[in-house]
Image (cartoon, helix red, strand yellow):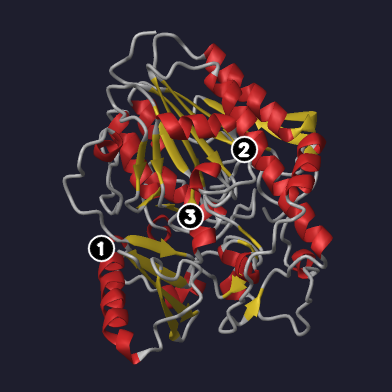
């Protein structure tokens, strides 16, 4: 098919998929031949980030181009809760694509409020009736506003729906498909058996990651596996999910033409599988954390030769809000109000051209915590929910990629710490609502029943993860 002036766009955003588990990022365990081929032929962003290390805020930032303080979703949303914040009244990418004549569809995870109802801007809607579990078993979806039950692997049904969208898309319109599988999200069970068995064998001799939980946290929210066998089983299930995604991508690519279609492969945020002694992501600790493993995401883009360089590896830090602006650019969309979007289009970088402006620092936000990356340095600042700033951390990611050595308390780095804090405060002031303060987070509408800033430490915090049930982690009613 001849290349169109407005390309088709397939946006594949996986749930809880970290950058570290990909061969093109240095991993030696995952088997992802299709991703490896794309990475060799197309464009890799080696330092791609989420703006928030938890599901709903990160996804809302992709859809709106806004930081959480502006779009108002600060934690994962309890689905179908009429009191939880949503994106109602905000302009999303889907609405912009639809207004510009695109045939639009969503298949999989939305998690920005009311997934059981079709959202504005989508011609086709296939999501969850009540939460995103299980990976295998009785699945409860909605197609449009009609409930559907299906038995089997969730990933199989979602892939079939995505392929159906591609097959049935009108020939006289460009299309935009958002495909959101949840394979790498917990629970770490019920991935395809042959893949799990393969990774059990491959991972048998893999040493555990360096563990150094940060004592300055009030508490470690999710415990570690009770034994080595469980740790390796969780990891084998995670890697099996990664390879499943690769199989899905292969089938999707068989049904599109990169001569007139842009493909984006990314995630909502990263994940820690024992890194730093932690499991899950930014909500693994109270207060939240901003470790690289929780923030770094894969980002590969491929498409027409007229728009894309070949075999490019771009080291400049970018994030999902930059991807928002890039999609606006590719689709020929007209930017809409509000103007408080910190992202910059990556189209020049992707085409192999020098970016005309210096890349801005990366900003991160999760409820009562913020962070900035400027050059090799990262500053993390946390706030008591109503008493002002707490501790400050500074890391040199070039010489200390494991974030073991906090420089904030060393006199030699006082000037650097102050400069980073000033830069972060100035940057957030450009994008946050007037008068907004992260230490007033309790004034924001609650997203779920267990936001980190609303929790008191349990009197006897379990040592081996039994608090997962206590806090509702993995509970469909809270996800």
Instruction: Confirm or deny contact between disc 2 and disc 1 (CB under 8 A).
Output: no
Q: Is residue 363 above or below residue 249?
A: below
Outermost residue to the bottom: 411
Which residue is under mark 1? 430
**Is label 1 in a helix, a strand or a loop?**
helix
Q: Give the mark toward the camera: 1 or 3.
A: 3
Q: Is residue 122 left or right of residue 225?
A: left
Q: Quadrant of the N terminus?
A: top left
Which residue is under mark 3? 296
How far across and how far down the image is residue 379, in percent?
38, 73
Q: Is residue 257 above or below residue 391?
A: above
Q: Earlier in the sequence, mark 2 or mark 1?
A: 2
Q: Give the mark toward the camera: 2 or 1.
A: 2
Q: Earlier in the sequence, mark 2 or mark 3?
A: 2
Q: Is residue 205 above or below residue 216?
A: above
In which quadrant of the rendered view does residue 410 lie? Answer: bottom left
How far across and how far down the image is residue 46, in percent?
41, 48
Residue drawn at (55%, 17%) of the image: 254
Outermost residue to the left: 356
Mark 2–mark 3 distance (CA, rounded to whole Å): 18 Å
Residue drawn at (75%, 54%) of the image: 234
Residue 74, visible in the rendered structure? no
Residue placed most toward the observer, 472 or 381 = 381
Q: Earlier in the sequence, mark 1 or mark 3?
A: 3
């Amino acid at each position: 098919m001849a290349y169109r002036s407005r390309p088709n766009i397939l946006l594949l955003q996986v749930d809880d998929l970290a950058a570290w588990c990909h061969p093109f990022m240095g991993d030696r365990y995952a088997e992802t031949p299709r991703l490896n081929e794309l990475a060799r032929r197309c464009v890799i962003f080696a330092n791609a980030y989420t703006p928030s290390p938890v599901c709903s805020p990160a996804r809302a930032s992709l859809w709106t181009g806004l930081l959480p303080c502006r779009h108002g979703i600060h934690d994962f949303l309890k689905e179908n809760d009429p009191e939880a914040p949503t994106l109602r009244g905000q302009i999303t990418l889907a609405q912009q694509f639809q207004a510009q004549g695109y045939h639009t569809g969503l298949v999989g995870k939305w998690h920005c409020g009311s997934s059981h109802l079709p959202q504005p801007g989508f011609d086709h809607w296939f999501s969850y009736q009540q939460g995103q579990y299980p990976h295998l078993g009785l699945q409860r979806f909605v197609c449009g506003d009609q409930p559907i039950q299906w038995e089997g692997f969730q990933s199989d049904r979602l892939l079939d729906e995505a392929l159906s969208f591609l097959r049935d898309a009108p020939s006289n319109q460009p299309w935009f498909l958002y495909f959101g599988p949840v394979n790498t999200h917990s629970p770490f069970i019920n991935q395809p058996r042959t893949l799990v068995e393969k990774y059990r064998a491959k991972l048998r001799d893999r040493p555990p990651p360096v563990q150094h939980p940060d004592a300055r946290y009030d508490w470690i929210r999710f415990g570690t596996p009770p034994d080595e066998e469980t740790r390796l089983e969780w990891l084998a299930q995670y890697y099996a999910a990664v390879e499943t995604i690769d199989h899905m991508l292969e089938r999707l690519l068989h049904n599109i033409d990169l001569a007139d279609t842009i493909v984006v492969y990314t995630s909502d945020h990263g994940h820690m599988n024992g890194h730093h002694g932690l499991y899950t992501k930014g909500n693994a600790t109270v207060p939240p954390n901003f470790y690289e493993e929780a923030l770094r995401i894969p980002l590969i883009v491929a498409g027409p030769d007229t728009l894309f360089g070949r075999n490019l590896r771009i080291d400049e830090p970018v994030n999902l809000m930059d991807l928002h602006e890039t999609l606006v650019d590719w689709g020929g969309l007209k930017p809409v109000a509000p103007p408080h979007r910190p992202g910059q289009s990556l189209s020049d970088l992707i085409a192999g051209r020098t970016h005309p402006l210096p890349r801005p620092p990366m900003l991160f936000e999760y409820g009562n915590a913020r962070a900035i990356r400027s050059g090799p340095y990262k500053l993390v600042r946390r706030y008591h929910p109503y008493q002002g700033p707490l501790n400050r951390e500074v890391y040199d990611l070039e010489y200390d990629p494991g974030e073991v050595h906090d420089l904030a308390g060393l006199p030699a780095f006082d000037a650097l710490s102050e400069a980073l804090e000033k830069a972060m405060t100035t940057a957030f002031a450009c994008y946050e609502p007037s008068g907004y303060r992260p230490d007033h987070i309790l004034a924001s509408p609650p997203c779920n029943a267990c936001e980190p800033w609303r929790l008191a430490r349990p009197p006897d915090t379990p040592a081996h993860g039994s608090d997962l049930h206590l806090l509702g982690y993995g509970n469909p009613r809270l996800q």
